[in-house]
Amino acid sequence: MKPLHSTLLAATMLAVAWSTPAMAEGKADRAKKAIAVAEAKISAADTAGADTLLAVDQAKAKQALADAREDLSAGRKEEAIETANHAAMIADANLGQAQRMKAEHTAARVEAAKTDAAIAQAQASEATQQAAAQQVAAANERAANAEQAAQAAQQEAMAARASAQAAMEQKAAVETTVTTQNTGRVAARKVVRTRVVKKPAHSTRVTGPVATTTTTVTQRVN
């Protein structure tokens, strides 16, 4: 029984001796992997803008990563794993926060762009309305001017007609000659003819010259 007991004890001690380096080597690998994960997450957060938007928190993550590397170099593998995981956690939070902030900033820019577009559209519509109003005002002014010109032309036409009418009336004035013939009677001469045979004397009427009076009357045709 003693040789069997001794053999088991030796095997156990050998297993412990073999497992100790393996366990130690496993912790170092886990520390390295944790550090690599933390590095990747910090880099992703920087790409998302955390180094600018969350400079203080991102600096904490980078400091934790540096501490984890120092722990691993000093052989403090457990501490290195824990510190690297803490750095990764900070970087994760910074990454999510930076993404939310960028999304909000993008949404705000989109909203501002929409507002600017609406304002520009309203201004364009107002400008169009003003231009239309100006065109209407110009058209009304042209119409008023045309109406005044038409009235002036009508007045000129009326004046021309009146002038023509007056000229026609002047030309239509006729001179009417009224001739009045007065037949005057001239005292008759008594002619006494002496003949052998005596006859009673008689009077002879002689028509004298005709007196003509000309009267000129000017008549206007209405």
Image (cartoon, rainbow, N blue to C red):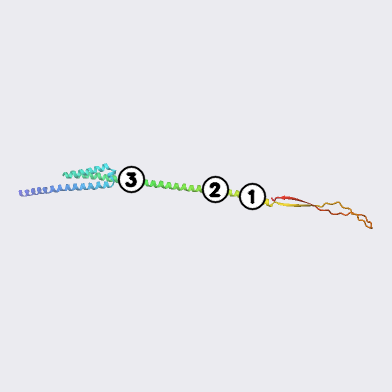
The residue sitting at the left extreme is 2
Seen at 27% across and 42% down, the residue is: 55
Q: Where residue 170 sits in the image (x, y, percent)?
A: 68, 50
Q: What kind of residue is marked 2?
A: Asn
Amino acid tagged 3: His
Q: Is residue 77 visible?
A: no
Estimate how packed mark 3 is, as few (under 14), some (14 to 19) or many (20 or more) residues with alpha carbons within 10 Å.
few
Identify the mark at residue 130; answer none if there is no mark.
Answer: none
Residue behind mark 2:
145
Amino acid type of the residue that numbered disc 1 sits on in the rendered structure: Ser
Question: CA separation, marks 2 and 1?
Answer: 26 Å
Relative to the observer, which residue lies in front, 139 or 29? 139
- Label 1 sits on a secondary structure element that is helix
Tag 2's secondary structure?
helix
- Left or right, 124 with respect to 95, comes to right
Mark 3 vs mark 1, foreground winner is 1
Give the residue furthest to the right.
197
Upstream in sequence: badge 2 or badge 3: 3
Residue 60 position in % (x across, y down): 24, 42
Proximity of marks 2 and 1: CB atoms separated by less than 8 Å:
no
Decide which of 138, 189 is in the foreground and name it: 189
Residue at the (54%, 48%) spot, across then down: 145
- Mark 2 Cα within 10 Å, few/some/many (few <14, many 20+)? few
Q: Give residue 163's mark.
A: 1
Q: CA distance from mark 3 to mark 1?
A: 85 Å
Where residue 110 appears, as percent x and y from the top left, is: 36, 47
Residue that mark 3 sits on: 105
